[in-house]
Image (cartoon, helix red, strand yellow):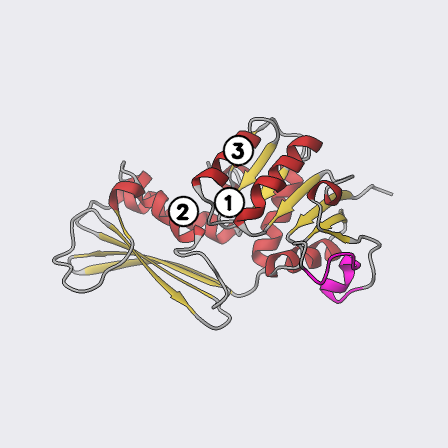
Amino acid sequence: MTQKTAIALLGISGRMGRALLTGIHQSTDLRLSGGLDSPDSPWVNQDAGLLAGSATTGVIVSADASKAIQGAQAAIAFALPQATPAVVAACVAAKVPLVLGTTGHSAEQRAAIDAAAKQIPMVMASNFSLGVNLLFKLSELAARTLNTDYDAEIFEAHHRHKKDAPSGTALSIGEAVAKGRNTTLDKDAVWARHGETGARETGKIGFSVLRGGDIVGDHTLTFAGAGERIELTHRAHDRMAFASGALHAARWVIGKPARLYSMQDVLGLS
């Protein structure tokens, strides 16, 4: 019998954590080896299987990152940004590869990620779905092909509980557009419009955001030119699309050299 790959889930009680738990339960080659949640979570010291409404797993949810990754061959983290430094430090100490899906990091938190990636292999992405990563590539190609007479606008919508805006995925789309135009998002992004804004500046990349209800995630990139409009849209119907991609990344990253990888690397799109 083939031995299953041991995966630790960090941020196990969140929306993505539960989807990942379901994905592991449905897989034939993966097993849950540990789970991490915040110290004040009611799930700490509970069997992880209860989170997915499945049979008990024998894996007890911990509030200690070092304990949660014991015995893991890879860890997947979808947690609050402030938890990232402790998560990456624990993975570095245990030499456990990490798949990181948390977004909204500060400069200090991002520095901790970059430092950790010099010691362990890490896959970091704002979105793990195959469709979204193809959208990133198409966004760059379209931006490179169309000149700046085509105005670029990015719209994203998520559920009412999402805490960062614009979404990490929207930012990645913007970065792809900027790359295609040989510029940077820091230089050309327009984050908000209100009042007397004046005419639109050529070459700017605009963002708009909707938060409401239980929207899983919608993203649309529009190139509006004279006489025509091109739209690239991705709509997520279920978080399992993201979970499947993250689990694929966890399988892929095991045994890779230490560095920071993207889903473009995982999928061979880079």
Residue 169 appears at what percent x and percent y?
Answer: 44, 52
Pointer 2: residues within 10 angstroms few (<14), some, or many (20+)?
many
Pointer 1: residues within 10 angstroms few (<14), some, or many (20+)?
many
Q: Tell me if residue 190 is in the magenta stretch.
A: no
Which residue type does callout 1 highlight? Ala
Q: Quadrant of the N terminus?
A: top right
Instruction: Give the left or right position of residue 156, taking residue 213 as reference.
Output: left
Segment tinted magenta in the rendering: 41-54
Decide which of 227, 184 is in the foreground and name it: 184
Q: Residue furthest right?
A: 1
Q: CA distance from mark 1 to mark 3?
A: 10 Å
Q: Which quarter of the figure has residue 38?
A: bottom right
Mark 3 or mark 2, which has the lower sequence index? 2
Residue that label 3 marks:
260
Which residue type does callout 2 highlight? Ser
Mark 1 or mark 3, which has the lower sequence index? 1
| Number of disc labels | 3
Decide which of 124, 133 is in the foreground and name it: 124
What element does badge 1 sit on?
loop
Residue 101 visible in rendering = no
Residue that label 2 marks:
172
Q: Residue furthest front?
A: 40
Pointer 3: residues within 10 angstroms few (<14), some, or many (20+)?
many
Residue appearing at x 53%, y 30% in the figure = 115
* Mark sitting on residue 125: 1
Decide which of 237, 259 is in the foreground and name it: 259
Q: Tell me if residue 50 is in the magenta stretch.
A: yes
Q: Which quarter of the figure has residue 41?
A: bottom right
Q: Are marks 1 and 2 in contact (CB under 8 Å)?
A: yes
What element does badge 2 sit on?
helix
